[in-house]
Amino acid sequence: MSTALIQQAQLVKEKLIAFGKTAFQKEYFKGLEMLQASMGSQLSEEAIIAYTDWFVLESLLKNNRRVLSFFIEQCKNDADILIAKQWYHVIYGIFHVKEILDRNRFEVLNLVNNVIYRVTTTVQTPLPLKKGEYIMAKIVPLENFHLFTGLIEQLSTKKKEDIYQMV
């Protein structure tokens, strides 16, 4: 996976978020207000990141369409469209970190569907993941890899049995 492709994916994600917050500003802020009301307190930065990621990739708007589909429809850059179209396939899961391939590339086993994924991130800072730990995360495809998107929650146990009880 080339660094240039990862950087391009980061730019596409930034464009998607900016588009979603602008084109669907009313829906975005209404959802944030509802989330804050349900939590009963000021939203954390992590909650806003998770909400924004969900909003642009998964929430259903007009005609049961996502922000992502509206973004692709108006996008003029073929390379951006090619990346964004892959993001219709959001995968949630509890993952077991099987291998650390390098500082921000991992091989993880999804305990929900028992599939191994090679995953990377668009952030430059090394992720503090360790081989053998369990995480709750969301990933999207990017060519022959997947990208972490939204938040990654490191789970407190290293025992598979404990994970299944948590779920």
Image (spheres, rainbow, N blue to C red):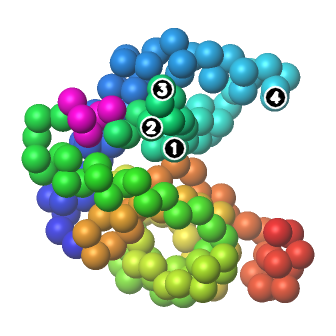
Q: Are marks 2 and 1 in contact (CB under 8 Å)?
A: yes
Query: Which portion, as a residue range, is magenta?
Result: 70-74
x and y, in percent, of residue 51 in the image: 59, 36
Q: Which residue is mark 4?
A: 39
Q: Quick check: 130 above or below 41?
A: below
Q: Which residue is mark 3?
A: 62
- The answer to which quarter of the image holds residue 92 is bottom right
Neighbour tally class for label 3: few under 14, some 14-19, many 20 plus, Cα within 10 Å: few
Would you say 106 lies left or right of 83 here? Answer: right
x and y, in percent, of residue 9 in the image: 26, 51
Q: Amino acid at mark 3?
A: Lys
- As measured in the structure, the alpha-carbon distance from the residue carrying label 4 to the one carrying label 3 is 26 Å
- Is-magenta flag for residue 73? yes
- As measured in the structure, the alpha-carbon distance from the residue carrying label 4 to the one carrying label 2 is 24 Å
x and y, in percent, of residue 37 in the image: 79, 20
Q: Quick check: 80 above or below 97?
A: above
Per the image, label 1 sits on a secondary structure element best described as loop
Which badge, 4 or 2, comes first in the chain's sequence? 4
Instruction: Name the disc covering residue 66, or none.
Output: 2
Residue 133 seen from this side? no
1 vs 4, front mark = 1
Instruction: Name the disc covering residue 11, or none.
Output: none
Neighbour tally class for label 4: few under 14, some 14-19, many 20 plus, Cα within 10 Å: few
x and y, in percent, of residue 130 in the image: 57, 77
- As measured in the structure, the alpha-carbon distance from the residue carrying label 2 to the one carrying label 1 is 6 Å
Per the image, label 4 sits on a secondary structure element best described as helix
The single residue placed furthest to the right in the displayed view is: 165
